Amino acid sequence: MKIGIVGCGLVGATAAYALVMQGVGRHIVMVDRDQKRARAEAEDIRHAVPFAHPLEVVGGDFVDLVGSKVVIIAAGAGQKPGEGRMAGLGRNAAIFAEIVPQILRYAPDTVLVVATNPVDVMTHLAARFAAASGVLPARVIGSGTTLDSARFRSLLGKHLGVDPHHVHGYVIGEHGDSEVLVWSRVVVGGMNLDDFCRRQGLPLDESLRRQMDEDVRRAAYRIIEGKAATYYGIGSALARIAKVVLGDQRAVMSVCTHKPAVAGVEDVTLSLPHLFGGSGILSTLPLPLAEDEQEALGRSARVIRSAIDELDAGI
Ligand code: NAD
């Protein structure tokens, strides 16, 4: 029941805090290039334990990851105001080349959960580095559009007056500007969205959809403009993903993982609804898409693939 966190800045530390608040696992090891920071974050979070769940939280080094069932990777530079998620790609790629083999050296049976942005490309790279250590791509999961799906559901839930837990809808593709909100497959209480809205007498016209789409797609930019970083949403999402893996819960979430081909694009990593559990990704669920959504997914896959190509050309 051990969870490792590599990269204990705002995202990694908030994930650790969320794990303690949710009572996920028994032992958290926090590793950072800045060891003083990792130890300080661990000590601070440990002081929340008496008010939450009985977990051990310690700062450590890669060697202390031995026995981790899940390792969350949030190492890298955060997105700066006005900066796209692709901006720090080269910097973060170099960090992953260093840390992924280190993690797998001590925790070869772990499931890697990547948060570092641009998360689809970083998950692709992590799977590539992991393959060199003999680890299957299914054991490498990125948070992908988990957070965007949560934003979509929370906005829809607010508009519909329904607890977002009971609004099922996915954002797929890139965790970024080209992501695709799958309006055609939103389900509330077994009803499709249009039927639900008609029945409840709620408006959901094109301009309202456009506004919600913009609110989901631009959320990170808005938050970063106001407070320089986002971490509560992603920290909670990472804790949830870790809980699914640790408990082999077989959840369906829009995490990202490597795909041989999607929408005509080969060898790419992006988010689709995935069934996953203790051994990582179990299967990809075929979400039937409307024609415009299918085209948008193809565009999104191409955005990720070209970022991978650019990165490979620069190496
Ligand atoms: P941060 O700068 O606060 O923390 C990054 C941490 O990584 C630092 O503590 C740094 O010391 C550490 N680090 C750097 N190189 C390292 C190495 N080689 N080994 C170990 N640790 C190393 O940044 P943050 O706000 O926590 O964001 C972290 C990452 O998460 C960024 O890439 C950010 O864009 C991403 N993020 C992703 C999502 C998502 O939905 N996937 C959401 C928010 C942020």
Image: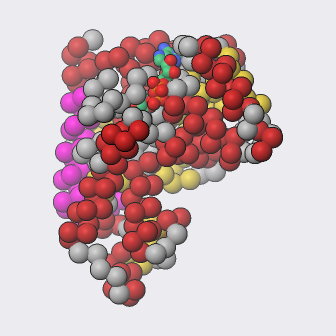
Query: Can you say which quadrant of the picture contains the C terminus?
Result: top left
Give the camera-side residue of 175 and 158. Answer: 158
Left or right: where does residue 248 sit relative to residue 216?
A: right
Query: What segment carries the magenta color?
Result: 286-308
**Percent position (x, y) of residue 11?**
51, 33
Residue at image position (69%, 33%) is 45
Q: Residue furthest front?
A: 226
**Percent position (x, y) of residue 116?**
43, 30
Instruction: Please determine whether, in this image, residue 138 is positioned above or below residue 109.
Output: below
Specify whether residue 226 is painted magenta: no
Q: How many marks?
A: 0
Residue at image position (35%, 67%) is 185
Give the camera-side residue of 293 and 15. Answer: 15
What's the magenta bit mostly, secondary-structure-wise?
helix
Question: Which of the 4 image quarters holds residue 223?
Answer: top left
Instruction: Please determine whether, in this image, residue 266 is positioned above or below residue 213.
Output: above
**Percent position (x, y) of residue 89?**
31, 23
**Residue 109 in view in this figure:** no
Left or right: where does residue 199 sit relative to residue 307?
A: right
Colouring chosen for the image of the structure = secondary structure
**Percent position (x, y) of residue 305?**
24, 33
Residue at image position (53%, 64%) is 165
Residue at image position (51%, 54%) is 252
